[in-house]
Amino acid sequence: MIDAYFPPLGTGFGDLTTEPEQVRTLEHYAPQGLRYGPVQLDASGTESVGYDNNADRLANGRGSAVVTSSGRASAVARWQRDQVHADMSVDDFRFISQPIQNRTNWTVAAGGTHDFGHDQLGVAYTHLSLVQTPVDLGALGLSQPVPYQYDTARISYTATTHGRFSFIPEAQLSRFHFGRIDPSPMQIDQSYRNRAVITEGITGRYELAQGRQILVMLQGTEIRYMSGNMGLPTRDSNGASGMVGMDFGLSGPLRFRALVGYQTRQYRSSVFGHISSPMAEAELGWSPTRLTMATLTVRHGIEDSAFENVVGFSYTSADIGVRHAYSRNIVLMAHAALQKADYPRTPEALNNTVLTQVGANQALYSVGVGANWLMNRHISWTFNYNFSSQHTVGAGSFPDHTVMLGLRFSL
């Protein structure tokens, strides 16, 4: 929500290629894309090879050589009062020794804005075709990826007053659709997870000064599951949340912005009752030198689970990333992340059934390093190493090491 409602921090929070000194350092190697009148086209493709010692992401998982092929393309057209955009991406993963883990993710998005001179109307649509693996929070610990699709359509209207205050009413409709696992002797039908999510809200924004803003958000959320599950009570729910936040607009090497609030979800079935939790998002940017950018992102809230007997859970995530322009065409990177989920115990009405579950938690840790060698505007080499380890109560730890070397081509 921070990225959606606050303007970018500085000239590009967390992105070396848009910080002034880094722009001057890397400008001779930056891809320029193609331009036709008001239309800007950008595209890139990457081919990578490497090794993953736990391709299954499970205890005692098998290792495999990995070949990945990725492509990105985007187009933006700008006129005096209008802007439209479209982009797509494809990521194909081939595991040589573990073909059951092969998968192809792809996304498409389109949207536009119209400026009325004082107010602005925005619309957007996104389709994601992805997979869940055992290391995703709230996912099932299965031996192969679970395919799913996510569609969302959003409309918003920014009404600006003659002062520093603006209102942003908006509405969003989203749909989750989970597919069967195929091929498999016993296909696992996860249609019980298919659901529609309707979100409506209003945001008030006040600009204290250039780069400093206060935000107040109120949202309502309705979740409706598309099919029943084994005769269990419905998991449909209505929820509400409120948040306040601020972009502190700190000068010098520090930038900080945050949103904090509270959310609650009331289930239609009295069996599940309700779940409530504080929610928060915060981002801190620090530039210890003119060629180095460090970012810290923290989030906490409520999410839906893949388990039939867990209607929702609270999660916390924290990410630290560091990028450093080592020379005119070499960028070094490092990151560390923590994700943690806390699952409530089974409602009393389900005690002594096959769905009985005590309270549990799940944690995922990861660290990694990388480098990007820009040979010219169109060709670059990438290197990445990542270590992750998942710990789940009663299941132990699942360590995983991945190393990849890639060649990227850009317009």
Image (spheres, rainbow, N blue to C red):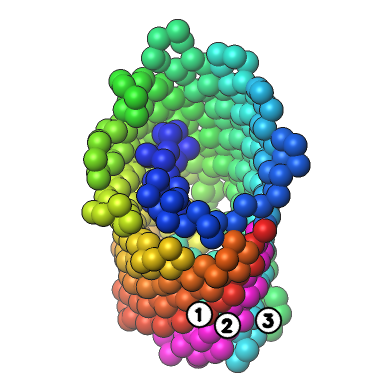
Q: Is residue 134 left or right of residue 288?
A: right
| Dots 1, 2 in contact, CB < 8 A | yes
Nearest the viewer among 149 and 76 is 76
Residue that badge 2 annotates: 49
Q: Residue at x 43, y 34 (%)?
A: 7
- Nearer the N terminus, badge 3 or badge 1? 3
Q: Are marks 2 and 3 in contact (CB under 8 Å)?
A: no
- Residue that carries the numbered disc 1 in the rendered image: 404
Give how far apart the Cα atoms at labels 3 and 1 are. Answer: 29 Å
Q: Is residue 353 placed above or below 194 in the rendered structure?
A: below
State yes or no: residue 61 in magenta: yes
Please give the residue where the numbered disc 3 appears in the rendered image: 184
Q: Residue furthest right?
A: 36
Determine whether the residue tagged by mark 3 lies in a helix, strand or loop: loop
What range is drawn magenta here?
A: 44-72
Relative to residue 71, is residue 311 drawn left or right?
Answer: left
